[in-house]
Amino acid sequence: MTNSRTALLSIAFATLIGGSTQCQALSFGLFGSWDSQARRDAAQASMQAVVDRFNVYGDFDWGSDGYVDVYYNAGVPTAQASYYGSIDFGGTWPNERVTQHELNHWLGTGTFGGWYNQFSGGAWTGPKVSALMQQFDGEGAALRQSGVHFYPYGLNFDSEVPNDSIYMRNVALTYAMRQDMGNGNPADPWSGRRITLTGSDPVGTSAFNWFGGGYSGSYPGWSDLHFAHAGGSYSTGDYLIRTPLDTYNPGAPTPSFTFAGDVLTINNTNGAAGGLVYNGKGTSGVVTIPNLQLSDGYVRHGSGSTDLFRLDGAITLSGTSTIDAAQGDIVVRAPIGGAGGLNVTSPGRTVTFASSNNTYAGATNVIGATLDLQGATGYGTTTLSSGARLLAMGAVRGALDVQPTSTVRVGRAGLSQVLPGGRVLVDDFETYPVGGIGATPNSTGDAWLGVSNGTANAEIVAEAGNQALSVRGLNAASDTWRGAVSDLSSGRAGDASLENGATGTYFFRVKRTTRSTIDAIFGLSDQSAATTTAPGNDVASPWDEYAVQLSIAGGQSTSTLRAYSDGAGDVVVTPVSNAQWLNVWLVVDNDAKTFRVATSSGEDDGVDSGQNFLFGRRTGATVGASSLTTFGIHEALSARAELDDLYFVDGVNLSNPLTQTPSYTGETLAVGGDLTLSSGATIEIDLAASASDRIEVVGNAVLDGTIAVTLAPDSPLTPNEDFTVLTAASIESNILLGGPDGALFGVARSTDSELILTSLTGLSGDFDNNGVVDAADYTVWRDNLGAPTHRLFNATLDGVVGSLQYDAWNANYGAIAAAASMDGATPAPEASAFALASLVLALSTLGRRSNADR
């Protein structure tokens, strides 16, 4: 062999895909003596494969002639390369991983003068690389430095190559690094604008972040032979696109990913075999598609039943598209617009509409699934098919058709409690089953999300008739924190988040219940409970995500409550006794970005510590104009920390809510068109003294089903107390009352535009519900002969009004309900012979009498 250059290969890729221009390609030559033909052949083959790979991607000869000299050097322990110099193989066998690693150095990674300037705190700061890293590895991902090397994707070890995508990601990052450093072609390596999927994503891959050139293996990818990129308008056709997984740990919780293209159109005509399929793991990651066009498209949950698909961005509908919670729940955070409609399907699963900005014009068909309406539907008719369920905290913009065996739940189960001064109970943990809260969907209705999918060390405990949330850590060398977080802005009747510029007071009780040393933290964050950076999802250093942070730390007799203040660190507030509840007030000023702490025990009001603390790990500057939306608690040392009775009120309020009597507030479902409740369908509502859930219908209401009523606990009723549960332009009603407490109420419609329930006296035969069984009740009975028995108050419901109800009136004639007696009502005499005789006449005319609604 000679030292003269022998160009063994010069691949001039003139790929004109999507209109891309030709570029001069990299090429190479092998020179000098080699210790064996086998090593030389291996170098030839690996250089050929690597150079091909780089040339497929883009123009890497920019700023040089693109020719790489390759030598064998016995004095080199492994392999080495210099910037635009040569590649020398030594003791390391020249496989593809080693060869590509050295070509990175030849192109300037770790060898170009501007390399070190791109790093800050060990992380690359240039925009091109930063964007690619988040495309490859999700929200918050960064390229990191180790001397002249980078990771991940630096091909530093064979273990860094779990799949074919790693090689092309290394190529893409090398191109982007050269762009950021200024020694490479500043133009992006793609030019495709209208790009289609050429085949369905194989399991474990995703066109979000896998190379689309089909270069490695049989992966089909995008028609422009590149990763998804800005400026591209993408469509799937008949094929299936999957959402990404964690690259190096596919079974771990999947981070949040954002699709890099300008538009992604799901124009599936291939049934469930096509469309967009969620393959992520865990409950915290969010899939964001800035412009998702569903043209008769199909979006499906295709992962485990405990994995939560959170979809964000913006959605536009044309035709009738489908959201299928086939294998797990879906939360659609993206606003939905366009002229099309939606089918929401999958029995036993829940699809949540979180946006109140949905404006699509078409119909919404809920087929067997549960639609959790925290925001709004579109303007077309919403139809609940047999077995479907609507959890309605928001607005149905169009008509609502509730078909047989389907259910509308107005608001969340239970009414919101409001204390004097407007203080709202966020959670007292009494409505949840005792035990581990579990993975999503969990036993708290996802009001609280636990660490590690909620399966580790977050549970509801019961002690002396009281329930609380209990957490404890793993006491391990790393990733030891366990706990739970709650989104304060949604999923409940009231919004307990604290907006920028506002001041509010959070009250709660905490307790340490262990003899061992404890390390527990709790407080408020501006990070969404659904993100990987939220306190509850960070098992290594959750404190980094808190703006307002308290902690309990120390041994059984030495524990203290501490507040973290920026610049001062942890500041002791008060001692903490073991196994005793400590009342805590957090007065938070989200304008000045400061907070104060007050404490007490028992029923005492709060005593201010007299100290003003700055927002902590997430400083005031970091929080900026954000709201504080998440409350979290967790512990590290396997000691148990408990939380109970979380309240919120605007402004400053150090009174003790545990000594105050709550009142209740109902929730409202708005229906923008007509409401049809079919026979066999159900509306579920909650009532309490002077409060109720209600439905406000802009159009007309036809009611032939059942209203299932639940009375709030510890809420005494006064007989004849009225509750307006539905308003409409007109009402045609044959409604039945059911549910746990339906028998306590009757229907009294005062006008054609209101459906009013009234609390019953409970006095059998008191058909007019005035507290006295008298002749007036006989008249009511007579006027309703043959009508459904629910037309009478305090009557046995056995079909139609007849002799059974008469017998009850006759037996109780003259009886007075307790409340009526206190009002001074006078009992009537015994039933007259005339009234008894009238029974025969009344029954004889049963078939000829018309019956008016009450």
Image: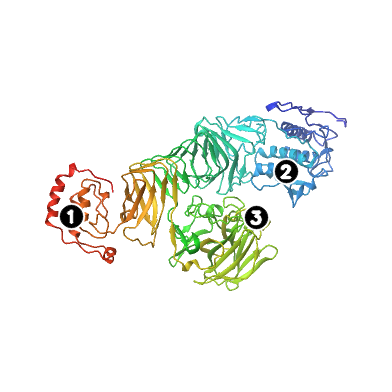
Front position among marks 3 and 2: 3
Mark 1 Cα within 10 Å, few/some/many (few <14, many 20+)?
few
Q: Earlier in the sequence, mark 2 or mark 1?
A: 2
Q: Which residue is mark 2?
A: 127
Tell me where residue 152 sits by quadrant.
Answer: top right
Amino acid type at circle 2 is: Pro
Q: CA distance from mark 2 to mark 1?
A: 85 Å
Task: Give 850 or 339, whichever is nearer the viewer.
Answer: 850
Q: CA distance from mark 1 to mark 3?
A: 71 Å
Task: Give 158 or 836, whichever is nearer the viewer.
Answer: 836
Q: Which residue is mark 3?
A: 623
Q: Position of residue 117 (x, y in %)?
A: 79, 47
Q: Which residue is mark 1?
A: 807
Task: Give 417 or 81, whichever is nearer the viewer.
Answer: 417
Tell me where residue 53 sits by quadrant.
Answer: top right
Quick one: quadrant of the N terminus? top right
